[in-house]
Amino acid sequence: MPRRSNLFQEVVATLYSHMAAKGEIVEQSAMLINSATRRRREVDVVITGKLAGEPLCIAVEAKSSKRPLDVEWVEKMLGKHKNLPTDKLILVSESGFTQQALDLADSSRISTISPENFGDGDREYGIVNRVPSLWPKSISLKLPDDAVKVRAARPGGKVAIFSAPRNLDIHADGGSYLGDIEELLTAALSTQWAGFAEHLNLRNISERTEIPFTITLEGPWKITIEPYVNQWICLQYAANGGDREYHKLTGVQLSGSALIDVQRINLKHMKLGEMAFSFGQGYIQGRPALIVVSEDGNQGKLTFRPLGELLT
């Protein structure tokens, strides 16, 4: 069972995923096979890809400590990777390395990297220093029993508008069961989330608040996935106790309230090699989270990672 990395190892793994080139695979807490013992060994980060058409395996070992890592740790990593399929070994230390450790790594063709604080002369310092923190916002929907109203076309052409329970079954017009109306709305909102956030004026909300909302999702509600391509999404409805009919769904109105939670996550700004990055940890919706932002001169990337526990 792979062990849980500490916070520094989580940050390093995220940064290498940001730096990965097209076609490269970055895996955290990867297991490599020792050719002598045939047993698996855990490596903090493994990057696999191809160089000139040949497979390439880059291993990254990261460690957090209060003091610079010494030559014994470098020796330990050399021994660990002696029989692993490692083509290139990179050692990352949060607090740097002793000179003896650096000398051994250099003579063994091992790359050593340590995060550095920005200096006043760094071009990036004046940019990242203007972003001391991020304020992620999360939305939880509170829906009453009468939250959903649907508009549907009956077989004879008449339009029916009625309140629908959230567990109302939906079908393809060929009769196949698809799920319930709540599952449909969840999928629909996920594809229109930017518009919903704008509807709530999320950009201008700076503190925890609850906002009532009513949104209308228009049709046509047709299926685009196999094997039901171009079939209508339908409701089964029995008018006045008669036989059930398929009503084509043409519109849905959703009403309720959105609880918007705003959290502050303070950022630390550093460099890892040539890459400028920022990271911070905090809680979002009561769950621990890590945010890593990087800038490598070509593009910026932001990664939000929920954590199983708040790491230190």
Image: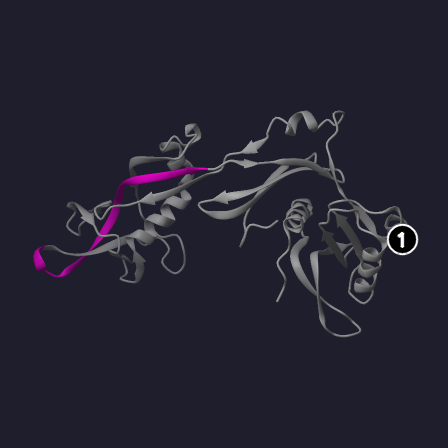
Write down the residue under mark 1: 104
Q: Is residue 259 magenta?
A: yes
Q: Is residue 295 visible?
A: no
Residue at 77% x, 57% y: name it: 53
Decide if residue 188 is on the left or right side of residue 60.
left
User: Magenta segment range?
Assistant: 240-262
Does 85 sit above or below residue 49? Answer: below
Q: What kind of secondary structure does the magenta stretch mostly adopt?
A: strand
Whole-percent x and y of residue 85?
Answer: 78, 64
Residue at 74% x, 54% y: name it: 60
* Residue 253 placement: quadrant: top left
Decide if residue 156 is on the left or right side of residue 32.
left
Residue at 69% x, 28% y: name it: 125
The quarter of the picture where the N terminus appears is bottom right
Question: Identity of the amino acid at label 1?
Answer: Leu
Does 37 sit above or below residue 120? Answer: below
Whole-percent x and y of residue 174?
Answer: 28, 60
What colour-coding does the image apply? one colour
Question: Viewer-proximal residue, 20 or 90?
Answer: 90
Decide if residue 307 is on the left or right side of residue 107.
left
Whole-percent x and y of residue 304?
Answer: 55, 44
Residue at 17% x, 57% y: name it: 245
Q: Is residue 30 visible?
A: yes
